[in-house]
Image (tube, grey):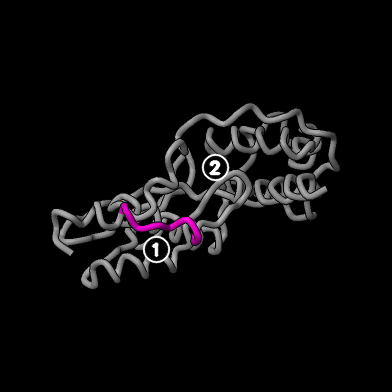
């Protein structure tokens, strides 16, 4: 594959039958993307970026991963937030969430070289406003000893507020459980647990 034609040849590969549908989003199977990449350029390489030795970066806006793919000597890098199946940020991801996001990031980095790029057309368009959610059961927080520590970040507060609304959880229930008057006072050490509980409550509501 000549360098001048590398992008064109990858872009012209028909990926339609390998596209997977999850909700309203289309995804290209990562094993297929890797296979087509290596068939086109056996010397192609990719690298999962490390941040202080970790394959993910934690910020106030969320958790991110980065993958760089090199084709014909051209390296292109893609940064991808850790998202759930509905493309919503996960502020307390599991190792599975991280791994899934790295695979999705790899496919997008490959797409920068042409393969499957058309799949992502329109992905940056704003989503339509969601319908008003129906009432749901409140989240159940497992009893645990209260801890102290630094306050959670503003981004975590905003995410918890959104989860409270989307899960139908009573805001006062969360405040009463932690013995606080506002969400900003939740200890950083408790953030992951409360976020995970609310995400589970949201999932139960969506499955109902």
The residue lying at 44 percent from left, 68 percent from top is 31
Dot 2: element? loop
Picture disc at residue 33: 1
Q: Is residue 208 above or below residue 61?
A: below
Give the left or right position of residue 33, taking residue 186 as reference: left
Q: Is residue 93 left or right of residue 14?
A: right
Residue 65 in the image: state x and y as whole percent.
40, 53
> Is residue 69 found left or right of 84 in the rendered image?
left
Q: What residue is drawn where x is 40% and y is 57%? A: 14
- Residue 199: tell me if it is visible: yes
Q: How many marks?
A: 2
When the figure is inspected, residue 202 is found, relative to residue 51, above or below; the finding is above
> Residue 51, can we see it?
no
Mark 2 → mark 1, Cα distance in angstroms: 43 Å
Image coords of residue 184 (percent x, y):
61, 32
Answer whether residue 13 is magenta in the image.
yes
Q: What residue would you read off at disc 2?
A: 150
Which one is nearer the viewer's eye here, 29 or 143? Answer: 29
Tell me what residue is drawn at x 71 percent, y 45 percent.
198
Helix, strand, or loop for circle 1?
Answer: helix
Quadrant (top left/top right/bottom left/bottom right) for the N terminus: bottom left
Residue 74: percent from left, percent from top: 18, 55
* Stretch of the chain drawn in magenta: 11-18
In front: label 2 or label 1 = 1
Q: Quadrant of residue 5?
A: bottom left
Q: Residues within 10 Å of mark 2 (few under 14, many from 20)?
A: few
- 139 within the magenta span: no
Indicate the position of residue 19 as horizontal and vertical percent values: 51, 56
């Amino acid at each position: 594959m000549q360098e001048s034609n590398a992008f064109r040849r990858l872009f012209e590969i028909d990926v339609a039958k390998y596209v997977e549908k999850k909700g309203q989003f289309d995804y290209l199977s990562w094993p297929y993307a890797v296979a087509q990449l290596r068939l086109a350029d056996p010397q192609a390489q990719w690298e999962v970026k490390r941040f202080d030795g970790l394959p993910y970066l934690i910020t106030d806006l969320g958790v991110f991963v980065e993958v760089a793919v090199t084709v014909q000597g051209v390296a292109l890098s893609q940064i991808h937030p850790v998202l759930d199946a509905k493309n919503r940020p996960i502020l307390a991801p599991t190792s599975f969430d991280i791994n899934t996001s790295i695979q999705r990031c790899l496919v997008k980095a490959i797409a920068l070289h042409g393969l499957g790029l058309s799949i992502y057309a329109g992905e940056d368009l704003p989503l339509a406003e969601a319908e008003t959610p129906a009432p749901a059961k409140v989240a159940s927080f497992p009893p645990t000893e209260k801890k102290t520590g630094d306050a959670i970040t503003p981004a975590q507060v905003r995410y918890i507020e959104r989860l409270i609304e989307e899960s139908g959880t009573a805001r006062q229930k969360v405040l009463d459980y932690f013995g606080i008057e506002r969400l900003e006072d939740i200890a950083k050490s408790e953030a992951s647990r409360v976020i995970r509980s609310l995400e589970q409550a949201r999932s139960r509501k969506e499955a109902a």
